[in-house]
Amino acid sequence: MLNGRDPRIDFFRGLALIFIFWDHVPHNPLGQITLRNVGFSDAAEVFVFLAGYAAVLAYGKILQRDGYWMASLKILRRTWVLYVVHIFLLAMLMGIVFFANSHVETRDLVEEMGLTHFITHPQQALTDELLLRFKPNLMDPLPLYIVLLAGLPLVLPLLLRKTWLVVGASATVYLLAPWMGWNLRAIADGVWYFNPVTWQFLFILGGAAALHAGRARAPEHRPLLRQPLFVTAALYTVAAAVLTLSWRWPEVHDALMPAWLSDVIYPISKTDLSPLRLLHFLALAYVTAKLLPGRGWTQNWWAQQSCRMGRYSLEVFCLGVLLAPLADMLNAMADDAWSMQIFSALLGLALMAGLAAWLEFNKRLNLVQGTALPSTSVG
């Protein structure tokens, strides 16, 4: 059976939302301490993996309790909600970017955000928006999640019964997609920046991890440094961190990286989820899980703020998307002063945390009112 909600999942999902916001504010100093600076993968991998984990955890329980058709209905209903949110969010984002662009004289924020298509071809852009082909900067993760979640009913029953069979089939599609050119269309004869045909593998791995976590297994008593898998994963994450940091200094990178090896590993594609990115995320996730066992560490105040943001990930993600161009506007108006960059990054974080706290308060208030209603009703 699948277990209940895991606060560690909420914590890391909240942390990924913070990183996504900071990463999408240009020249933000706090963006230098996010995951993308210490390895091949970044917050996008965290987002998709945990989306698969949470989806299988939630809808797998519904399938076991209420049957396949009820689970599928709830998945598709959630997919529809995400689709409507995507359309509404894109409209709001365009309004905010146009507003911000009118206050910035040194840069063209409309072009930087990928909104030129809407100005030059407004009618086609509206059609492309409805078909999920028009995805300005910041908007890529949500359409990806919509497509992955919409496909979950096709594999969920078999995933629960024959997990490794589904994982194997998903891996096969992942490996074939770059060679066969499988991807979805985007505007101007382009393709999706996050290729759903390859990123589905990470989503499925997240679901498989949720199923694995719910099964009893013998505890590992050996010290971590005597566990070969942990040591291998840790060495890989350290090597990836060193290589990623060397990108800042080309002469250091050239000294570390032989030409033949450079030809083998580059480019490290984000669109097709390069195996190096995938392996880095899996290694990092494994090392983190080993170093942070149990759930007690999620009970401190700071961790609870991230957990709360993770519980309301859709709302917080949408707010982060809208705040990023506003933060960029404030920074540009202040000539990208370091103090303003720090202020806008922290203010955005505070607003995202504040939204999560408000939503949590409203949820508790509704629960209190719901339990009070029977005692106060007449008849």
Image (cartoon, grey):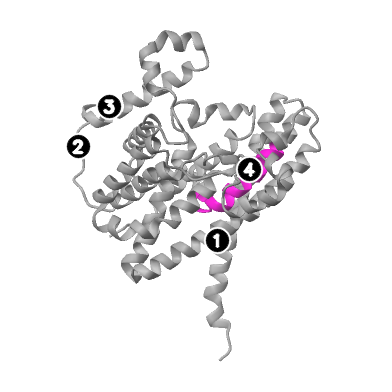
Residue 355 lies left or right of residue 228; in this view the side is: right
Front-most of residues 160 and 241: 160
Residues at discs 4 and 2 in contact (Cβ within 8 Å): no
What percent of the width, then of the height, locates residue 276? 37, 29
The mark lying in front, picked from 4 and 1, is 1
Q: Report the label total.
A: 4
Q: Which amino acid does label 4 sit on?
A: Ala
Instruction: Name the image quarter holding residue 140.
Output: top right
- Which quarter of the figure is the N terminus placed in? bottom left
Residues at marks 3 and 4, CA–CA distance in whole angstroms: 38 Å
The residue that disc 3 covers is 232
- Which quarter of the figure is the C terminus placed in? bottom right
Residue density around tag 4, few if under 14, some if 14–19, many if 20 or more, within 10 Å: few
Residues at marks 4 and 1, CA–CA distance in whole angstroms: 26 Å
Give the magenta part as a residue range.
308-327
The residue that disc 4 covers is 350
Q: Residue furthest bottom?
A: 379
Q: Which amino acid does label 2 sit on?
A: His
The residue that disc 2 covers is 221
Front-most of residues 376 and 249: 249
Front-most of residues 95 and 226: 95
